[in-house]
Image (cartoon, helix red, strand yellow):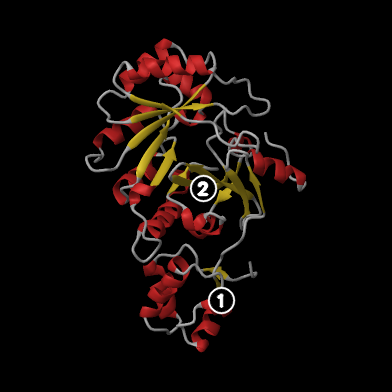
Amino acid sequence: MPEGKEILLGRTLDELTELVTSLGMPRFTGKQIAQWLYDKRVTSIDEMTNLSKANRTLLAERYTVGRTAPVMSQLSKDGTRKYLFAVSTGGLVEAVFIPDKDRATLCISSQVGCKMDCLFCMTGKQGFKGNLSSGEIINQVLSVEESASLTNVVYMGMGEPLDNATNVLKSISVLTSAWGLGWSPKRVTLSTVGVRRGLERFLSETTCHLAVSLHNPFHEGRLELMPAEGGLPLEDTLQMIREADFTGQRRVSFEYIVFDGVNDSDEHAAELARLLRGIPCRINLIPFHQIPDVPLRPLSRDKMEHFKHQLESRGYTTTIRTSRGEDISAACGMLSTKEQMARGGSAPR
């Protein structure tokens, strides 16, 4: 990235219009630049050929497109591909491409590290290193090899998306606006532990799908797994969801990583069912990917099926998510941690 230059990628049409008028260019130039960035997906200002040579030169003096290729990738035997991107803070973030029949999903990151410090998450062990800009978020979508064939994007990579709400919501605007990538909001899902202010904005400013990281229906049990429960109690998140409009095609789901002997009992299933009563939703049970120095164990398939049956018998649509990419440091944060340490960075906490 040219030093000292500002990035165009990730800017909204209004921001691009304001930018060009401040440089003395016609207002419509903002729409032209948006088309080059998001429809034609150029990587340099020189490629914006319907801008005059003088305007391209003027633009290039202060700005750059901001597209950067991944620094490395790993391909799993099941077709999952994990990418590593360098970002402006000097850190590394991951994006994961997951093919599944007619779906081609990209899981993207929103922060370097994470403040939430969930016990089961490798990203949290890195500590918080910084927010990604909207451009760095969109760059992941545009710069993976499979970009042109993507059907879905999920904000489930490194970081808590709603702890970086302004940049994340701007990137969603780029994804879903006619002047941007023009995707239906139904192709986008955001996962959160329940950051109140960010969640309020997400529910009011978008119609994208919501996934809530739940993992334990009991307050004390969830607090042990997810320290954020102390300041962001699940009860408050569920109340906000009950008050939100989910009458259209928008969906809410609950993510539940199942740990052997921790959150897998019949009592947990019964409390989870009670807690979610009245919320039309799907429950996704997720196998645990073992990470170093964490005293949590994956649940056997038989026990996972039993837990699923407990929820289904109470009327909940419940799925067991298939483990993907286990041969390529699949757990979120594993690859970036390994590469960071290989480059001489500090070990996770």
Number of the label disc, if any, that sits on residue 51: none
Q: Tell me the mark number nearer the camera, choosing from 1 and 2.
A: 2
The relative height of residue 265 versus residue 171 in the rendered view (above or below) is above
Secondary structure beneath dot 2 equals loop
| Residue at 33% from the left image edge and 43% from the top image edge | 200
What separation in Å lies between label 1 and label 2 (alpha carbons)?
Answer: 28 Å
Q: Earlier in the sequence, mark 1 or mark 2?
A: 1
The N terminus: image quadrant: bottom right
The relative height of residue 49 versus residue 106 in the rendered view (above or below) is below
- Asked whether, in this view, residue 84 is left or right of residue 177, the answer is right
| Residue at 47% from the left image edge and 48% from the top image edge | 164
The residue singled out by tag 2 in the image is: 108
Report the front residue among 222 and 268: 268
Residue 228 percent location from the top left of the image:
48, 32
Asked whether residue 263 is in view, the answer is no
| Residue at 50% from the left image edge and 31% from the top image edge | 322
Residue 263 percent location from the top left of the image:
48, 17
Secondary structure beneath dot 1 equals helix
- Asked whether, in this view, residue 286 is left or right of residue 309, the answer is right
Quarter of image, res 216: top left
Residue 327 percent location from the top left of the image:
65, 35
Report the front residue among 235 and 289: 289
The C terminus: image quadrant: top right
Asked whether residue 334 is in view, the answer is yes
The residue singled out by tag 1 in the image is: 62
The relative height of residue 139 versus residue 316 in the rendered view (above or below) is below
Callout 1 environment at 10 Å: few (<14), some (14 to 19), or many (20+)?
few
Amino acid tagged 2: Ile
